[in-house]
Amino acid sequence: MPAQDLTTPGGLLLVLAVLVPFAGMLAGLALGGRNAQRVALATMPAGLGIAVAIAGALSGAGGELVYLLGNWAPPLGVALRADAASALMLVAVAVVISGIAVYACGDFSTPRSAREARAPLTFWILLLAVWGSLNLVLVGGDLFTLYVALELLTFAAVPLVCLDGRGETLQSALRYLLFALLGSMFYLLGAVLLYGSYGTLDIALLAARLRPEAVPFAAAALMTAGLLAKTALFPLHIWLPPAHAGAPAAASAVLSALVIKGSWFLVVRLWLKAMPSLAGLASMQVLAGLGAAAIVLGSIVALRQERLKLLIAFSTLAQIGYLFLMFPLAFDPASAQLAAGNALAGGIMQAVSHATAKAAMFMAAGSIYAALGHDRLEGLTGIGRAMPVSMLAFALSGLALVGLPPSGAYLAKELLLEAAAQSAQWWWTIVIQAGGMLTASYVLLVLAHAFTLGERSTARVSRAARIGEMAALTLAACSLLLGLLPWDAWLPPARPALSLPLSLEALSKGLWPLVAGALLAIWLGRWGHPAPFGKAIVARLGAARRAGLAVGKLIERIDCRLRQWPAASVSLLVVAMLLGAAVMVAR
Amino acid sequence: MTAPTIFGICAALLVGIGLFGVIISPHPLRKLLAFNLIGSGVFMLLGAVARRGAAAGMGGDPVPQALLITGIVVAFSATALAVALLLRLFNETGSVTLAADARAHPDAGDT
């Protein structure tokens, strides 16, 4: 019996990581009323502790934690596995969930007059459900367990979209559910095909048994396409913007920071662990090509949004694209398969950094909405003075996303650039750099509006909301300071040091995307600049600006078309076929 | 032609019909039914796979059957959740459609 088929010491932690949130969920449901919130808040430190313990057990050694359920070895039994990448994600998820929980205490406390209120009860139970199913996605060791975990994640995420029960949010929730179900059927079909050929769904066994032949090609294409639908990668992002439009801020933070990372992580698992030998350069180019398209489309449409919350939602769309750039960069031409190295480290770092930053952004936007009663960009003038903490949180998380050192995104960018240089794929260097600029453009657009001095803002911040603002600021600071953590213990990169050079050179590297982003925002932004000198610049641009607006409008139209149901579902088929063809070509 | 092959072909047909329905029919309830057709197709394929595994001399491979039952439970819960959302949507708005776009209007005036 090979060594990996034994429960390792500490394997029980994996079970606890899944069990504790679900136990909290059940307890919250049984006790009801305001107890749900108490149980959820009590679960947070426990879950956080377990995640940190798992990460501690995996530091340095580079091994795996394994737990065999009921001591049955695969292929008959089910194994839970965690490596360093999943441990980091576990910790990130726990931190972000805790941050969101602190923030949500303001929005989702049961009012004193009532014994039980629908929205708070549902929110706290679903928050724990999302956490438990995400942890299962991160530690699941076989493709069918992962299918069930993904479905649980979707079932927990969908009602979060329609917590307020208005017609349009119900519609977005239904649209999300139906599209996600279509995606999961693709995934399940692929898994069934794999079982039919190899008699196992265990990831480690599959990796050993897979041969380059027709069935795994088809399965890989189907499963990946299905997962992309759940991740909302362009052009399968039909459900993402409307889901964010009406969801409460805390729910948006959960969806955007965490839920989509579940299916993304599974794509990583699938290609790097289960079928690294199947991945040809062509199929990985397709994945990253979709990512590049997502970056361009998401950023430009974000620049044209009227509402802050939708701007952030489209920013998520772009950042999802960024997450997929790691795939071709992980391709090792020498062994003709995917290898964990700088690219994987960069991808995980990007995911962690986006999770913290995006949650902070949505929370800050939620505080602003609560104080102003709206979140129209044009009405944000002067909010920087009225709500300094929230705007600081927004600014810090924005800068962290752009990749200003010492943020996690900066390190991620450096790692991906390094991987691109190593594998001689210069075109992804351009995309990575352009992505930073585009991110800077919409972040600066918001900051320009918020920090323009106008008439006194009417924003009112209640005392309860102040705690929420601090939670957002803490998460934003986390994201900005991620680069200072000692990552070497978990993500051994091919290059010796994953250290952070705090030099002028690094700072200038971080600053020039900001300059380019400002220019892009002036050129493509729909709302111009609120300050008088900004208006003067915009007026001076004349024809160039008109061209910029026309480009933006065209891209927005394309986005609208793609988000119609028939177009999106046909896109799903096309993506599956494209991936299948690309996998075939490589062999 | 062996029995598993026939079942496999039927499964493919079911998945195909389901996909067609999901893409074409505008009504969410029909989409949901079509989704269930795809599900049935996949589960039938799983059954055929179990039977083919039986060629090894067993009476049938039991693992796919366990997966199948779990899969059906998951698909059933998904359907229940979707129907609940549909009913609620109908009660709120008096109609059931996915067509309207909750988002901005690309053709609104530019500044």
Image (spheres, helix red, strand yellow):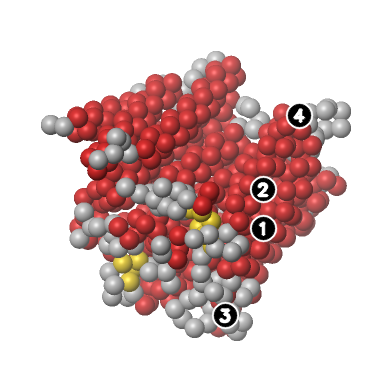
Say what secondary structure mark 4 lies in: loop
Pointer 2 and pointer 1: residues touching (CB < 8 Å)? yes
Crowd rating for badge 1 (residues with CA inside 10 Å; few <14, some 14–19, many 20+): many
Is mark 2 in CB contact (under 8 Å) with mark 4? no
Instruction: Please say if A454 is above or below B84.
Output: below
Report which residue position mark 2 lands on. A20
Please tell me which of labels 3 and 4 falls first in the chain: 4
Discs 1, 4 touching: Cβ within 8 Å: no
The tag on residue A50 is 1
10 Å neighbourhood of mark 4: few (<14), some, or many (≥20)?
Answer: some
Image coords of residue A32 (percent x, y): 76, 31
Mark 1 residue type: Ile
Determine whether A290 is above or below A65 in the image: above
Residue name at image x 48 percent, y 41 percent: A148
Q: Which residue is mark 3?
A: A499
Q: Nearer the viewer, residue A376 or A587?
A: A587
Report the disc number at residue A117.
Answer: 4
Labels 2, 4: one chain = yes
